[in-house]
Image (tube, helix red, strand yellow):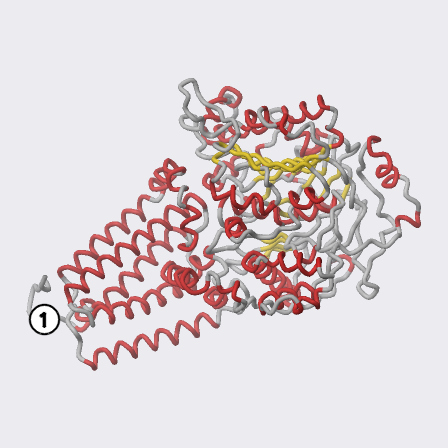
């Protein structure tokens, strides 16, 4: 096809000539798509928008130069194909971000292969939400194809023009490098994101879709398995030791829980009105151990069925209270790692771990040693749904056990699988590329600290259940790695609910799952069972969600929108599961010998307006992830209120401590909540929360609690700690690091 000419070429202005060149056209095309996406998806930030536009222009110029060197007919075909693929990628990101509130990675394509089908209704609804940018991008593609066919001049330039374009590209690259370098060096800076590709979410927000797609491709082709060859740059940063005054320590309060009539006021509590009953002290670093605080007496304990431990908690003498606690670490010599491997990444990670301080045992260590353990990851569960009258079982368990008032479930990459990974491993999942749990399964990873493996070593009967397809996300491959060889789901042994027509009910009933699984483990002693529920799955409506329809009458009169009522209705099925579970445990006579742990996989991310409505206010980027952690046993004679900020990453080390199991706290990102270590809640984008302030990684803003002012040195130290923990989690997964620890332990 020839070029479309309205007048003689010589009459065109220099600007039009440049626009008709492949270089100019593709630079403008990519820049405009970045601008459209950014304006509709992010709050305006001129610096980040500048990053995106400049990078898009550079890439557009480069692609245009290549196109001008290829015969026109072939070049036009290639241009249309590449433009169409890019727009498809753009539309996928638009819809994916609308559904999952984060961004899609090319290298995780296999992990999301079946999500498109399962989320088809949600995808259609999301297209409706994003219809304006969706149509603009489609129109832009149509215009792009028209211009490629009829307007762009693909003729080979004179060498002077190529020289000019190379100069322009060089100037653009130089400016981009300088601009990015001036935006900081921390893990969340654009410069670090280019170098390490640690977060697809931050990469899209700070550098744009073009850069993210290219960086993702580079990772997929060249870097995906590089760490296994020992050539990865783990890049651990120096963590400055920042001395703090006593009043600035990361202490937490533990007080008897309020009466039920007062518990409803928890969300608006005033910290200054609470009694400081149990302030922990920092470990004595010079002695390598810490002394129990003199005022460190137990607030909650277990009933007479465990008399020895209960008496030790209640009637311990002064000398026992002051007995030195032990560091929570393995009895191994990490300096011997180089004797079993030459992998430089493994050795570097080991050196970092050896440089960190472990947490210590505490008064709650072994409180539930020998107990049965039921661990539940609840689909789409949000603590704002708990109500004294509507969900009495959830209310009782959340208030009468350990009552966590500052608990968060960050929205980890990988949706439910990412949330599961954090809950079960004490590590945050990778923020881009591979799905961490799938990677563990693919490489037959060693995960010795997971509860399934720990308790199996203690002679427990261990099993796991999921009331959805057993192989979804390749769980049938990863479950044995985390200790659940005996894993049953739909289509490999678990009975599933059908309607009167014999059709598979979606979502499945959590109550139905409990009724058909309790008998499989209740006669084993001791046992550990892991449940992954599904009743709380989206969509939240009364026309496609079987659980919402089932419980519609229970929520009909609630003063909420239809969507919020539908969400509550499907979560009621989880409430009924817990009611049945506790009744069965009591009937069996083992309720007071069983510890129950419950945490959501994520908040209802696709419908955050539900959370706002339940909370009664529009929540900020931190409080929207505030949730409820339940650690409960009928044996507890008094509840314990915990106000220390904590997250899903802290569940594993906390439960390991409560069960009296051996682990190395230095090798987990999460920390035992009952340790005296300063509170640190790490969010998915590198933002974090301490008991003194919040840091927003996207904006760099700090929100202080009260009059506390964070120093530059303290902030820098915290940023390094957060960065290192992300890197440590990635390296542990990529390197199958725990396999080296197991070998080292055997050769001790």
- Relative image position of residue 305 (x, y in whole percent): 82, 31
In this rendered view, identify the residue nearer to me: 160 or 37: 160
- Relative image position of residue 329 (x, y in whole percent): 74, 56
User: Residue at the location (53% across, 21% down)?
Assistant: 554
Quarter of the figure that contains the N terminus: bottom left
Instruction: Spot the residue most to the top.
Output: 500
Q: Quadrant of residue 255?
A: top right
- Relative image position of residue 491 (x, y in whole percent): 47, 32
In screen coordinates, is 4 left or right of 353?
left
User: Residue at the location (50% across, 19% down)?
Assistant: 553
User: How many C-alpha atoms fall within 10 Å of the one at disc 1: few (<14), some, or many (≥20)?
Assistant: few
- Relative image position of residue 744 (x, y in whole percent): 69, 61
Instruction: Spot the residue most to the front.
Output: 747
| Residue on which disc 1 sits | 9
In this rendered view, identify the residue nearer to me: 496 or 427: 496
Quarter of the figure that contains the C terminus: bottom right
User: Residue at the location (72% across, 40% down)?
Assistant: 459
């Amino acid at each position: 096809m020839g070029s479309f000419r309205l007048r003689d070429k010589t009459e065109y202005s220099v600007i039009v000539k440049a626009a008709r060149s492949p270089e100019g056209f593709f630079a403008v095309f990519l820049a405009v798509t970045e601008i459209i996406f950014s304006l509709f998806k992010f709050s305006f930030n001129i610096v980040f928008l500048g990053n995106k536009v400049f990078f898009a222009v550079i890439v557009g110029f480069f692609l245009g130069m290549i196109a001008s060197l290829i015969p026109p007919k072939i070049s036009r075909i290639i241009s249309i194909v590449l433009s169409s693929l890019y727009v498809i990628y753009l539309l996928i990101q638009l819809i994916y971000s609308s559904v999952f509130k984060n961004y899609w990675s090319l290298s995780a394509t296999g992990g999301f292969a079946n999500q498109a089908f399962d989320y088809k209704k949600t995808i259609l609804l999301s297209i409706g939400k994003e219809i304006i940018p969706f149509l603009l991008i489609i129109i832009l593609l149509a215009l792009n194809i028209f211009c490629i066919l009829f307007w762009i001049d693909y003729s080979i330039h004179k060498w002077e023009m190529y020289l000019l374009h190379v100069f322009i590209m060089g100037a653009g690259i130089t400016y981009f490098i300088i601009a990015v370098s001036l935006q900081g060096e921390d893990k969340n800076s654009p410069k670090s994101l280019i170098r390490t590709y640690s977060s697809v979410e931050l990469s899209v927000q700070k550098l744009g879709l073009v850069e993210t797609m290219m960086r993702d491709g580079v990772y997929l082709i060249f870097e995906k398995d590089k760490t296994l060859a020992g050539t990865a740059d783990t890049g651990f940063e120096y963590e400055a030791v920042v001395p703090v005054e006593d009043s600035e320590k990361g202490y937490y309060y533990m007080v008897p829980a309020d009466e039920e009539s007062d518990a409803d006021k928890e969300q608006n509590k005033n910290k200054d009105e609470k009694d400081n009953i149990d302030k922990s002290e920092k470990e004595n670093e010079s002695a390598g151990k810490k002394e129990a605080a003199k005022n460190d007496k137990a607030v909650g304990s277990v009933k007479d069925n465990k008399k020895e431990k209960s008496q030790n908690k209640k009637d311990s003498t002064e000398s026992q209270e002051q007995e030195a606690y032990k560091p929570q670490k393995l009895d191994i010599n990490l300096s011997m790692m180089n004797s079993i491997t030459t992998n430089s990444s493994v050795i570097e990670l080991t050196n970092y771990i050896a440089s960190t301080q472990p947490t210590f045992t505490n008064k709650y260590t072994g409180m539930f040693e020998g107990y049965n353990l039921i661990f539940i990851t609840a689909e789409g569960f949000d603590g704002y749904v708990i109500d004294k009258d509507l969900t009495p079982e959830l209310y009782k368990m959340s208030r009468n056990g350990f009552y966590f008032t500052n608990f968060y479930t960050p929205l980890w990459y990988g949706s439910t699988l990412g949330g599961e990974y954090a809950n079960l491993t004490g590590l945050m999942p990778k923020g881009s590329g591979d799905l961490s749990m799938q990677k563990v399964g693919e490489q037959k990873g060693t995960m010795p600290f997971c509860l399934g493996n720990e308790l199996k070593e203690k002679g427990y009967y261990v099993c796991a259940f999921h009331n959805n397809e057993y192989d979804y996300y390749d769980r049938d491959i990863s479950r044995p790695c985390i200790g659940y060889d005996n894993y049953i789901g739909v289509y490999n042994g678990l009975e599933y609910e059908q309607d009167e027509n014999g059709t598979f009910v979606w979502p499945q009933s959590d109550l139905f799952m409990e009724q058909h699984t309790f008998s499989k483990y209740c006669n084993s002693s001791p046992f550990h069972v892991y449940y992954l529920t599904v009743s709380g799955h989206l969509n939240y409506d009364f026309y496609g969600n079987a659980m919402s329809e089932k419980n519609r009458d229970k929520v009909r009169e609630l003063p909420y929108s239809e969507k919020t009522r539908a969400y509550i209705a499907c979560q009621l099925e989880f409430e009924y599961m817990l009611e049945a579970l506790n009744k069965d445990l009591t009937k069996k006579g083992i309720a007071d010998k069983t510890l129950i742990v419950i945490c959501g996989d994520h908040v209802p991310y696709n419908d955050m307006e539900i959370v706002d409505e339940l909370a009664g206010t529009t929540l900020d980027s931190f409080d929207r992830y505030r949730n409820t952690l339940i650690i409960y046993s009928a044996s507890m004679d008094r509840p314990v209120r915990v106000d220390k900020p904590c997250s899903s990453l802290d569940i594993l080390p906390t439960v390991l401590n409560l069960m009296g199991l051996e682990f190395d706290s230095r090798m987990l990102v999460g920390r035992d909540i009952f340790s005296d270590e300063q509170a640190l809640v790490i969010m998915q984008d590198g933002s974090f929360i301490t008991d003194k302030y919040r840091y927003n990684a996207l904006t760099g803003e700090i929100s202080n609690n009260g009059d506390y002012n964070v120093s530059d040195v303290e902030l820098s130290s915290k940023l390094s700690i957060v960065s290192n923990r992300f890197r440590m989690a990635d390296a542990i997964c990529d390197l199958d690091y725990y396999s080296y620890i197991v070998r080292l332990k055997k050769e001790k």
